[in-house]
Amino acid sequence: MLYPSIDKLLTIVDSKYKLVHVAAIRSKQMLENHHFQMAESEYKNKRTIGRALEELDKGLIKVIVHNEK
């Protein structure tokens, strides 16, 4: 089973596409800057994409939606 659960993450972000976009951006930031918001030992995932999802699940990443009309 994957951690964190997609169902739990979709309560934070309203669409799968936005979830993928946010996780990809954060994962890229981790790779480029080597900046993690939690201690390395606290992550359950080894890859940055999983770590980005964990940060989103713990509320360390805030998703801001801009309404453009």
Image (cartoon, grey):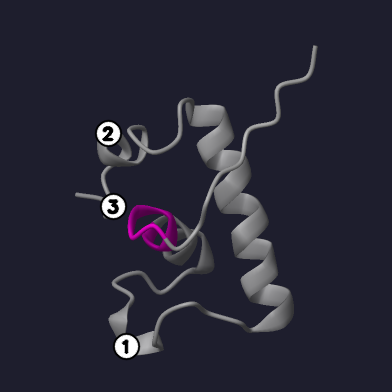
Name the side, left or right, on which 54 lies relative to 22: left
Q: Secondary structure at mark 1?
A: helix
Question: What segment carries the magenta color?
Answer: 54-59
Label 1 or label 2, whichever comes before in sequence order: 2
Residue 1 spot, x, y in % from top left:
19, 49
Residue 40: quarter of image: bottom left
Circle 1 is placed at which residue position? 41
Residue that badge 3 annotates: 4
- Type of amino acid at the residue the image marks with label 1: Ser
Label 3, secondary structure: give it.
loop
Q: Nearer the viewer, residue 65 or 25?
A: 65
Q: What label does residue 20 carry, if any?
A: none
N-term-proximal mark, 3 vs 1: 3
Q: Residues within 10 Å of mark 1 (few under 14, many from 20)?
A: few
Is the residue 49 above or below the residue 8 in the image?
below
Question: Which secondary structure dominates the residues rendered in magenta?
Answer: helix
The quarter of the displayed image where residue 33 is located: bottom right
Q: Are marks 3 and 1 in contact (CB under 8 Å)?
A: no
